[in-house]
Image: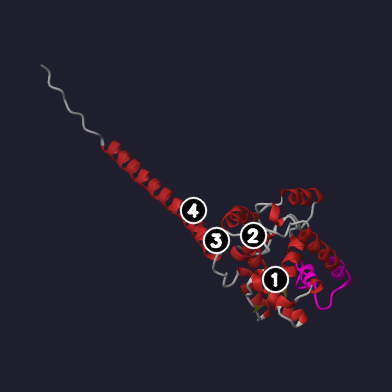
Amino acid sequence: MARRTRTSKSPRTTRRNRLGGALSGLLRWLRRWALRLILAPLALVIALVLLFAVVNPPITHTMWVEYGKYGKLDRHWTPIEQVAPVMARAVVAAEDAGFCEHWGFDLAAIRIAIAEGATRGGSTITQQVVKNVFLWQGRSWTRKALETAITPLVEAIWSKRRIVEVYLNVAETGAGVFGVEAAAQTYFGIPAKDLDARQAALIAAILPAPRSRSAADPSDRVRRRAAAIMDGAATIRADGRAACFED
């Protein structure tokens, strides 16, 4: 019976196998770290959304930037219970009249903004809260993509009333001024709980451009805008569109 001869691998084959094993190990290591790099920020965002559902955001990126510009930061966090109800209705009427009826995105407003080529519009209060609390200002696809991803998460975890409360406290209302409490004191010398319908509408009217508009010395354009907001605030109260954030 013939004896089988054992063939040994050549040094070149051995090196090739070792190199293949090393590359396979490196790819596995890279996949693990890529997964961690993706999951870590996601876990952080989820944790912050959960935290800020009950804990007030201490400061935002926009506030830091504005503090660097003006050397001041005028902000007084105020619970929504201590803000005049008409102020909440005014900002909703001005910025997102369908707030109680959507899940974070106003698709009708987005379509109108796209059709008209508007540079501003279609952004809901929830989206603005996400931008102000978790992200940064400016126009970029990266920021918009992150905003789009986080908005449904905030809508799912926070109540509508909480979203409005945070908005009332983080919205920029002047140069280095944030929130309606600071705005009420800056422009009218009163706390936010004492604002009347006209004063609340004037503050809401300057929100699109708070550094160039004044609620205390409004232009004709701001006055006209405030009058429309007053009507809108009364309307959403009457037709029930304010029910989701009011007691």
Mark toward the start of the polypeptide (1 vs 3): 3
| Residue at which label 3 appears | 49
Q: How many marks?
A: 4
Residue 18 vs residue 196, the one in the foreground: 196
Mark toward the start of the polypeptide (4 vs 2): 4
Left or right side of 99 for 151 = left
> Disc 1 marks which amino acid?
Glu
Residue 131 colored in magenta in the image: no
Magenta stretch, residue numbers: 200-225
Q: Which residue in the rendered view is the most extreme toward the bottom?
A: 189
Residue 193 vs residue 27, the one in the foreground: 193
The CA span between labels 3 and 4 is: 17 Å
The CA span between labels 2 and 1 is: 20 Å
- The residue positioned 72% from the left and 48% from the top of the image is 107
Is there any visible trace of residue 176 in the rendered image? no
Residue 219 colored in magenta in the image: yes
Neighbor class of circle 2 (other Cα within 10 Å; few <14, some 14-19, many 20+) is: many
Tell me where residue 94 appears, x and y as whole percent: 77, 63
Q: Which residue in the rendered view is the most extreme toward the left?
A: 1
- The residue positioned 65% from the left and 52% from the top of the image is 103
Neighbor class of circle 3 (other Cα within 10 Å; few <14, some 14-19, many 20+) is: many
Q: Does the residue at mark 2 contact the one at mark 1 (Cβ under 8 Å)?
A: no
| Residue at which label 4 appears | 38
